[in-house]
Amino acid sequence: GSLRVGAASTLNIYSIANEEGTLGWGYFPSWINTYGLTGDGVVVDYRTLPGGIAAPYNEGQTLTHEVGHWMGLYHTFQGGCNKKGKRGDQVKDTPAVA
């Protein structure tokens, strides 16, 4: 069965023990058009949460980072920040970084 609850506007957060080394991931809003609600939400390795053993990544910032993606934010270096016509995270007041 599915763990997912709510509509696309409901943030579902899943915690796992990911032995592959990825700290977490978040689905972008636009992905619903392709994948539907399957997989919609944010997944984090529970060891990255405050008190977890994934130092130095155990302060909860992975969850914050992935929720940003779920809300549609890209990395500030997305798309090559110094290339003409590229806007990094696509937020005009955020400077692009390498």
Image: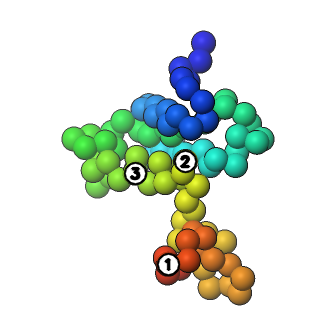
Q: Nearer the viewer, residue 86 or 29?
A: 29
Mark 2 secondary-structure assignment: helix
Q: Name the residue rendered at 25%, 43% in the picture.
A: 50
Compute the Cα span from label 2 to label 3.
Answer: 10 Å
Pointer 2 or 3: first along the chain: 3
Q: Residues within 10 Å of mark 2 (few under 14, many from 20)?
A: many
User: Along the horizontal axis of the image, is 63 left or right of 88?
Assistant: left
Where, quadrant-wise, is the N terminus in this rendering?
top right
Q: Which residue ends up furthest to the left in the rendered image?
A: 51
Rendered image coloring scheme: rainbow
- Mark nearer the viewer, 3 or 1: 1
Q: Nearer the viewer, residue 10 or 23?
A: 10
Q: Which residue ends up furthest to the right in the rendered image?
A: 34
- Let me know if residue 18 appears in the view: no
Q: Name the residue rendered at 72%, 34% in the picture.
A: 36
Residue 6 falls in image quadrant: top right
- For badge 1, the amino acid type reads Asp
Compute the Cα span from label 3 to label 1.
Answer: 20 Å
Which label is found at residue 93?
1
- For badge 2, the amino acid type reads Trp
Pointer 2 or 1: first along the chain: 2
Q: Residues within 10 Å of mark 1 (few under 14, many from 20)?
A: few
Which residue is tagged 3? 64
Compute the Cα span from label 2 to label 1.
Answer: 20 Å
Mark 1 secondary-structure assignment: loop
Q: Name the residue rendered at 70%, 40% in the picture.
A: 32
User: Along the horizontal axis of the image, is 13 left or right of 57?
Assistant: right
Circle 2/circle 3 CB separation < 8 Å: no
Query: Looking at the picture, does residue 22 appear above or below residue 2?
Result: below
- Let me know if residue 89 appears in the view: yes
